[in-house]
Image: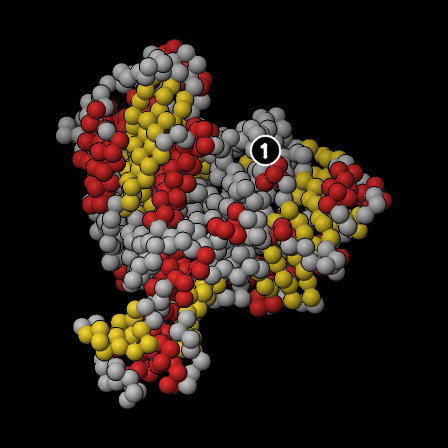
Amino acid sequence: MPEITSIQSTARQQSQSSIGEPITRTDGVLKVTGAATYAADNHPADMLHAVMAVAAIAAGRVTHLDVEAATAHPGVVEVMTPDHRPELSKDPDARDDPFMFRLDLLQNDRVRYPGQPIAVVIAETLEAATEGARLLAPQYETETPLIGLDAGEAFVPDGVGPGEPAETGVGDIEDGLAGASRRIDATYETAAQYHNPMEPHAIVAAWDGDTLTLDTPSQAMTIARHRVAGLFGVDADNVRIRSPFLGGAFGCKGMILSPQALGIMAARMTGRPVKLVVRREQMFGPVGHRAPTRQTLSLGLDDEAHLTGLSHHVRTASSVFDDFFEPAAGVSHTLYASPAIATSHDAVRVNSGTPMFMRAPGEATGSLALESAIDEAAAACGMDPLVFRLANYAEVEPISGKHFSSKRLRDCYQQAAERSGWARRPQAPRSMRDDNGLLVGWGVGTATFPVVMFQGHARAVIRADGSGLVETGAHDMGQGAWTALAQIGADSLGLEMGHTTFRAGSSELPDAGVAGGSGHTATAGNAIHNAGRDAIDKLAELAINDEASLLFGAERRDIIARRGRLHLAHNEARSDSYRDILGRAGLSEVEGQGTGAPDQALQEQFAMHAHGAVFAEVKVDPDLGQIRATRLVGAFAAGRVINPRMVESQFFGGMIWGVSFALHEQATIDRRSGRIMNADLAEYHVPVNADVPSIEAISVPEEDRHINALGVKGVGEIGITGTGGAIANAVWHATSVRPRRFPIGIDDILAGERGS
Ligand code: MOS
């Protein structure tokens, strides 16, 4: 594995701290030169290839597999089926916590969803394994699949998302709506979406006795180790995971899923290292997705255009065998002030793979509906939608009554409005056209995302030569963790980037927690910050007690660390270098340990969210109904910015996924077979460069000392939350048609046109 150090960076060197510098990605050169090793780039000696055969039906039973034909194919070594597979130490259908999902590890002949693994062919070459899998020619007994949001009796789940209540609220919603002088009732539907990072799930698994080495992309190596240890009956310490680079993830690499476990089973069965890479079409089944939703919102308004009631009900779906419920109504707890708010979820079971965390799970789906309904409310009051939002956003979190930083939202609205030229927007819809006769519309959406922190650990070392080393098992999905965390590391040790080595991406390093919930920088970053401070404390202790030091007898609190030296904050002349302190003490290094975790006392006192506003321009062809997002301007307040280049890039990414949500992305299900008809990247549309002509993201400065020591919130997912609504509202402004289905289709626009 290539060692990544910060030395390759082209940063403007700064005298004090690298925090806040727009340093380019420390792993950028490795990536663009092909030197970055992704999981599937590993080829241990004697390695075999495994290919999954997956179900072509959505529900039923596999009645026959031609194992004989597959086994007879030259190069095929083993065919793993429910009748012929290694024993597992844990039932794949057992589930102990919200971050453990039920797996399909050939436990029987049942088919519960299309794309479910039904056999694995292991061969000397990828070609032989692929051909062997084809030769299995499965036969089925087919049952009628459960499809869609009316598939059966709906039920109220025990919890939604990672365990939030399915039904909650404040005030009396009946009274709130009954007392309103105006009322908006609207229903919105969102499609099923599949994560589809560029790099599919892949694993290279190698057993050595009871020790297991895995090359596999992971957003949470410690959770993965324990999952694997449980399934295979080995100690978690015996499971080593290397995950230096991920080619995207979006939530689907948060857990070890069926294909990875099957790869490990194949390695155990054959006694040789095995590589298993999920084929693109196999990404639409066993590795999670975002469930579809149908969301019904009711908003009551008084004569002053203030909300009197907000009710948000979500229907969603989970698989027939496991639970994950898209927590879409949660966003209605946090954004707008209303004396009465009620949110609820119910669900049906369908023959799909189990849904899972995906790109702002809940906030993305829910804010799209909420922001659309808020826009309808503004229009019903005859108000500019920005003015309406400024009058209705919450200054304390409605659900908890706790204070939070939403005052920054005003700055976000104002800065994005100014930049986008919002003041020139005519209020009436369908009143702008461009030179080519296309309808032009401008819309606004509010962005919000909670501040999530997991628990993570780090180690920081100052070496006798004055250099630093920072280690944490962090995960870089492409978001820039290698870079931002290295900046925090250098800062925490009072060193420049070029004098600090940063190591991450391996389970042998301290557990950095989960790269999810946009909480990795906050979690691992605070762990590093604390580890660095611990190392500096030890160094200061040495100097304070060393008569030969100019810092002899000083108070620890008066000492600061900068550029490889400790010195008195008020007297730079009294200083000592790391190298000299360690040299005189005869030590080769000092080591610090640190943990990053949510502070319970602060959590009880404050609600924690990042906020933002997105303005969108769309152009719509009045004859063809074709929609293009032509301009996006976002402004976000998300705490301290470690690296403005990485942060801007995260905002861009989120906003582009917002375009995707509003206009492109959907899995289309065949109502007869229950299969996904567009299980490939040609027909499962995601935005490409041509779909996003102009995009700007403004970071609104925010120092929020109530969040964590570093003041870091999260930037990974918030961009998706404002953008979808802004586009939907811009489509209305262009056409006077209120989108009710996402992605918004040409037919929706044309049907609306006919009706208007
Ligand atoms: Mo994300 S859905 O928290 O990886």
Residue 555 in picture, x, y percent from top left:
22, 80
Which sits in the foreground, 8 or 218?
8
Residue 574 lies left or right of residue 150; in this view the side is left
Is ligand 1 closer than 8 angstroms to the Cβ of mark 1?
no
Q: Is residue 330 visible?
A: no
Residue 373 in picture, x, y percent from top left:
30, 29
Q: Is residue 303 visible?
A: yes
Q: Secondary structure at mark 1?
A: loop
| Residue type (three-letter) at the residue carrying disc 1 | Asp
Q: Residue at x 68, y 63 (%)?
A: 207
Q: Residue at x 45, y 17 (%)?
A: 747
In terms of image quadrants, where is residue 179? top left
Residue extending farthest to the bottom is: 547
Residue 237 in picture, x, y percent from top left:
57, 68
In terms of image quadrants, where is residue 234? bottom right
Which sits in the foreground, 22 or 687?
22
Residue at image mark 1:
680
Which quadrant holds the C terminus? top left
Residue 8 lies left or right of residue 670; in this view the side is left
Q: Residue at x 73, y 45 (%)?
A: 126
Task: Give above or below for 187 relative to 487.
Answer: above
Residue 269 lies left or right of residue 495; in this view the side is right
Q: How is the image coloured?
A: secondary structure
In terms of image quadrants, where is residue 746? top left
Q: Mark 1: few, some, or many residues within 10 Å (few <14, many ≥20)? A: some
Residue 446 in picture, x, y percent from top left:
29, 37
Which quadrant holds the N terminus? bottom right
